[in-house]
């Protein structure tokens, strides 16, 4: 910790840092921030910075509101979209109670707790998300900047410069980008981040979403991670590549298996498949999330796995010869508007439960599941993901796994918030109803 503090002090001096933004998230994954002058940083690192937790979504009641934000010096980075003179840095914080106890309502603490359980079982979790998003002309209406498609190179593509600047900004923040490209829908893009440990990646996802939006804003455009902003086009997903390592060894890899998957890897998949109905409310937490999870738009709907088939919920990406350490699974249902701390937590908890319960992995289905009739899927025992936020929340509320994973406080607050959202949606009269029924009834 001492050497990290010294590194931070040198960065502050070399880069003319005048303010440090302290970041953390509420239970829905919204970034919270307040600034301190750089002169206050030593005190913040030693003692934390007090704030009123009752004003943060899902944190505390008014009678137990005192909280401390304790900066994590390993997350120090200069914000590239702020001026280089009198520059601004950011640090992620852990939230504690006044006596220094990690706060049960802090999503970062939830993930740390689940990673500790994995460590006690001998595992480190690595993740590599592929988060899609849209560029629009404003936040008022989903008007795309282009009509391009998957991997398209468009002459004078306005978004190409936005993507380039975003990648450069991410790299200035110390975030490794694997590649970026145009996605399937008009004005839809994807930047894939190089895999790293789950806690670093959750911090990175929060930074990534803000960076994409900030760079778009500087050009007068709007970037959104809304799961399904345009009815007639694919929505935005966040496919999450994940693996467990035991020291230097990939616990998912077995050179003698037809898919190069170890028994641990198969048990992890079995856990994901068994518990995904219960944790989908966390990985897909908005009413709009379920407009994406419908047949015909490349998003998974059915609970199954395969090696190459992208209609499945879980896919096993092909591994190049000599790159066996890259063996991993890809969960295709999450969307990029989730809270990454909680989303990574529930995926890990489900996979670890599969290992603990020594669950048998079902047979893979390497064909197009959308081409099957419902009766055929029933015969194969293939179930579907929840079809609405209401269905997902009902399953999540009754889930012992999710309650244990998130902790009683976060589980209760999350469910209560999502029930309110569903009630607001359920009583909202939509354009569909006006257009469909007003001329007839």
Image: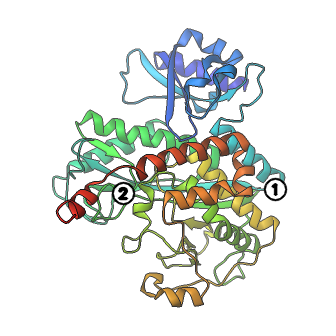
Q: Is residue 249 visible?
A: no
The residue nearer to you, when weighing 242 against 348, is: 348
Location of mark 1 (residue): 122
Reply above or below: 10 against 223: above
User: Which percent across, then down, holds residue 175?
Assistant: 50, 43
- Left or right of 422 on screen, residue 180: left
Q: Is residue 29 above or below residue 98?
A: below
**x and y percentages locating residue 75 in the rendered image:** 59, 32
Task: Please say if the residues under marks 2 and 1 sit with CB atoms less than 8 Å apart.
Answer: no
Q: Secondary structure at mark 2?
A: loop
Which residue: 35% across, 21% down? 83
Residue 370 located left or right of residue 104? left
Residue 438: horizontal and vertical position, in percent?
Answer: 20, 59
Residue extending farthest to the front is 441
| Rendered view: 10 above or below 387 | above
Camera-side residue: 150 or 273? 273
Which residue position holds label 2? Answer: 228
Mark 2 or 1 closer to N-term?
Answer: 1
Q: Quadrant of the N terminus?
A: top right
State the CA–CA distance, disc 2 to disc 1: 38 Å
Image quadrant in which the C terminus is located: bottom left
Judge depth for marks 2 and 1 and give the one in front.
2
């Amino acid at each position: 910790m001492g050497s990290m503090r010294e590194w931070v002090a040198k960065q502050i001096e070399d880069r003319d840092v005048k303010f440090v933004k302290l970041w953390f998230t509420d239970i829905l994954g919204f970034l919270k921030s307040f600034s301190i002058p750089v002169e206050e940083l030593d005190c913040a690192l030693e003692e934390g910075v007090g704030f009123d937790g009752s004003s943060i979504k899902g944190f505390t009641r008014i009678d137990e509101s005192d909280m401390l934000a304790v900066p994590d010096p390993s997350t120090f980075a200069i914000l590239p979209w702020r001026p280089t003179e009198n520059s601004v840095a950011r640090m992620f914080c852990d939230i504690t109670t006044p006596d220094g106890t990690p706060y049960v309502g802090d999503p970062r603490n939830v993930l740390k707790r689940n990673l500790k359980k994995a460590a006690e079982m001998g595992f480190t979790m690595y993740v590599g998300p592929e988060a899609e998003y849209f560029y629009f002309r404003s936040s008022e209406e989903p008007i795309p900047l282009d009509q391009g498609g998957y991997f398209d190179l468009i002459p004078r593509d306005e978004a190409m410069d936005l993507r380039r600047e975003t990648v450069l900004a991410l790299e200035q923040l110390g975030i490794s980008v694997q590649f970026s490209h145009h996605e399937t829908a008009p004005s839809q893009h994807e930047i894939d981040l190089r895999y790293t440990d789950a806690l670093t990646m959750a911090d990175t996802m929060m930074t990534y979403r803000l960076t994409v939006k900030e760079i778009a804003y500087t050009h007068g455009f709007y970037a959104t991670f809304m799961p399904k902003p345009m009815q007639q086009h694919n929505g935005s997903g966040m496919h999450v590549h994940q693996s467990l390592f035991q020291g230097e060894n990939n616990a998912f890899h077995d050179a003698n298996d037809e898919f190069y998957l170890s028994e641990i890897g198969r048990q992890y998949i079995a856990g994901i498949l068994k518990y995904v109905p219960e944790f989908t409310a966390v990985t897909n937490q908005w009413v709009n999330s379920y407009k994406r999870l419908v047949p015909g738009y490349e998003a998974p709907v059915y609970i199954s796995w395969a090696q190459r088939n992208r209609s499945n919920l879980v896919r096993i990406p092909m591994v190049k010869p000599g790159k066996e350490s890259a063996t991993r699974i890809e969960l295709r249902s999450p969307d990029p508007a989730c809270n990454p701390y909680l989303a990574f937590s529930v995926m890990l908890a489900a996979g670890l439960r599969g290992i603990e319960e020594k669950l048998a992995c079902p047979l893979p289905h390497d064909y197009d599941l959308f081409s099957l009739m419902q009766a055929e899927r029933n015969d194969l025992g293939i179930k579907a993901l929840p079809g609405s936020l209401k269905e997902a929340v009902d399953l999540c509320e009754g889930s012992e796994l999710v309650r244990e994973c998130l902790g009683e406080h976060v589980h209760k607050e999350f469910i209560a918030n999502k029930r309110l959202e569903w009630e607001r949606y359920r009583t909202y009269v939509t354009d569909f109803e006006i257009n469909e029924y007003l001329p007839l009834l």
